[in-house]
Image (cartoon, rainbow, N blue to C red):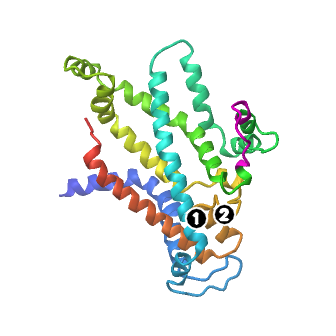
Amino acid sequence: MVKVSKKHTIRLLFVLPFLIPLFLFWIIPLCLAFAISFTDWDYLSADIHFVGLYNYVDIFTDSDFMKALINTLVFGLGTIVSTIALGLLFAFIFQKNFKGHRIYQMIIFSPWVTPAVAVSLVWSWIYEPERGFANFILGLFGLQPLEWLHSSDTAMLSIIIFTIWKSIGWTMLFYIGALERVPRSTYEAAEIDGANDISKFIHVTVPLISPTTYFLFIINLISSIQVYDQIQIMTQGGPGGSTTTLLYLYYKKAFQNFQMGSANAVAMVILAIIILLSLLSTYVSKKWVHYE
C-alpha cells in the first residue's frame, strides 16, 4: 500500500509542471469566462451585475448570432470535406517517387507554414475585382469577373477557397504517411481475389487509413469552428455579415461592442458545439474507424 502511494506521488511530481500551465491558462480562464457569461460586464468599468440567463436568451433570439451559426456551418461543410478529399488525392499523386516529387510536396505544404496574416493579404490582392489574378484566370476561360470579397454572394466562397488552399499540404503529409503504412500484402491478397483498383481503394485503402481520416476530420472540425485570422484580414466579417462566424462574432461583441457577458455566452456555445460534435464523432468512429 505504501509502495503504491509513493508511485502515485512520483507520478504526480512528474506531471505537476505540466498541470500548472493547464490550470493557469485554460481551466481558470474557462471558469472565469463561464462566470462572466452571466453578467453585464462592459470590460471597461468595474461595475458588474449578475443577469442570470439573459445573455444566453439574448444571443439565441439575435438574428446576427443565428446568421453567424449558419455561416460557421457553411464554412465547415465547405472546407472539411474538400480539404480531406484533395489532401488524399495529392497524397496518392506524391506517393509515387517520380523526379522532383519532394520539391512539389514542399511547394504544396509551404502555405501551411506561412503566417495566415501574410497569405491572407496576398489573397486579398488576388481577389481584387479590377486587377486581381483570380478574375484574370476567369477571363482566360471566357467567364465573367466576380466581385469575390466585395459581394455577399461570393465572400464566403472566397474564404473557403483560401482555407482549402492553405490546408491541403498539411492534410497531404498525414495521408502520405498513412498510405505508406498500408501493407503491400493486403493489396496482393485483394488482387488474387480479383479486386480492381476501385475495389482495392474502397475495401482496403479507406478502412486502413480511417484512423488518419478521423484525426484529420476532428482537427479540421475544430479549426473550422475557430476560424478567425483570414476573416479578420480579408473581410472583417462582411459584406453584410456574410462571413461573420461564431468566433468573429465573439470578437465583435467583446472588443468592438464591449459586451463581455454576451461575448462569453457565445464562447460557451462554441465550446458546447465542439464538445457535442467531438462526442458524436467518437460515437460514429466506433463503427467506421478501424485500428488495425
* Amino acid type, label 2: Gly
Which percent across, then down, holds residue 209?
A: 34, 34
Mark 2, residue position = 241
In the rendered image, the quadrant that contains the C terminus is top left
Marks 2 & 1, CB-CB < 8 Å contact: yes
Classify 56 as above or below 96: below
Judge by depth and name the residue closer to the eye, 138 or 107: 138
Range of magenta residues: 138-148
Mark 1, residue position = 68
Evaluate whether residue 28 shows in this view: no
Judge by depth and name the residue closer to the eye, 140 or 219: 140
Q: Going 71% across and 58% down the picture, which residue do you hit?
A: 236
Q: Does the magenta stretch include residue 290?
A: no
Circle 2: element type = loop
* Amino acid type, label 1: Ala
Which percent across, then down, holds residue 76?
A: 51, 52
Left or right, 11 with respect to 17, comes to left
Judge by depth and name the residue closer to the eye, 226 or 206: 206
Can you name the residue that lies furthest to the right here? Answer: 130
Q: Residues within 10 Å of mark 1 (few under 14, many from 20)?
A: many
User: Residue 211, which numbered label?
Assistant: none
Evaluate whether residue 20 shows in this view: yes
